Amino acid sequence: MKHHVANQSGRYLSLPYPRLRQIRQRVGQEVTTRLMLATVICRLDYCNAVLAGLPQATVAPLQRVQNSAARLIFKPSSREHVTACLLQLHWLPVRWRFQFKLCCIMHSVSYGTCPAYLTNIVEPAGAGRTRSGLRSTSSTDYTLPRLRTKFAERAFSYAGPSAWNGLPEDLRAVAEPADFRKELKTHFLLLLIMFTEICSRGLFMAALRSRCGHYIFAL
């Protein structure tokens, strides 16, 4: 998988970037942004849910592709962090895009708009519970299967429910898919802003201990 990701990231950088650099000198940021979305970012999003759970070192080449796209649009100084560019573009980092895709799939599972084979993979937390007083019977959580290896956490049966269970209840209650995707992206962008501010203030360990920080670093 590491070899595959490295090859794909090399293709993303080698095919459109030389031409886009030439075009960038003659057009503005808006046109360049649209070209980047059409030629680079859409490729990063294609079937990216299968990359969830990979080590940071494995997905780092894909993140460098996205960072290069953002830098080509805004042309910041070499000392300026690329996160500010990503926030201005409303682009989620690569690992967060994996979680976004998983949450969208789980939303279709939860509201019965997905194929049957996906519904059969996951199990609601309240399934099989006969006591109506249990909190799990009214919860929208999904059961996390017991696994023996870290590698198994990449399976959708675990990665999907894990991403879904980390969302707030009010966000999971949004039934319309388009509205859910909009609210979900806003939710992740707010977490990214909080994460950036926390790291800039040197409160890394405090965020790690908090519930919000635990979810952020799990991404």
Image (cartoon, rainbow, N blue to C red):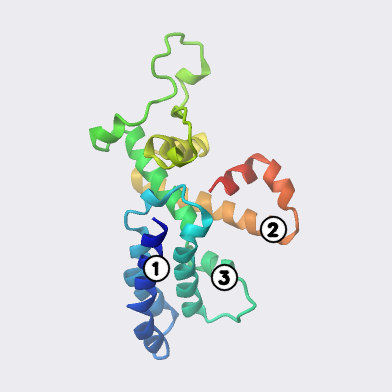
Q: Are marks 2 and 1 in contact (CB under 8 Å)?
A: no
Q: Are marks 3 and 1 in contact (CB under 8 Å)?
A: no
Precedes in sequence: disc 2 or disc 1: 1
In the picture, the disc for residue 199 is: 2
Q: In front of the other: label 2 or label 1?
A: 1
Q: Horizontal and vertical percent for residue 162? A: 48, 37
Write the residue at 39% across / 61% down: 3
Q: Horizontal and vertical percent for residue 123? A: 38, 26
Amino acid type of the residue tagged 1 in the rendering: Ser
Closer-to-camera residue (27/1): 1
Distance from the alpha carbon under mark 2 to that under mark 3: 14 Å
- Crowd tier of the residue under label 1, counting other residues whose Cα lies within 10 Å: few below 14, some 14–19, many 20 or above: many
Amino acid type of the residue tagged 3 in the rendering: Val
Q: Secondary structure at mark 2?
A: helix
Q: Which residue is mark 1?
A: 9
Q: Secondary structure at mark 3?
A: loop
In the picture, the disc for residue 82 is: 3
Closer-to-camera residue (188/4): 4
Precedes in sequence: disc 2 or disc 3: 3
Q: Horizontal and vertical percent for residue 81? A: 61, 71
> Is 63 situated left or right of 120 in this image?
right
Q: In front of the other: label 3 or label 1?
A: 1
Is residue 29 in sight in this rendering? yes
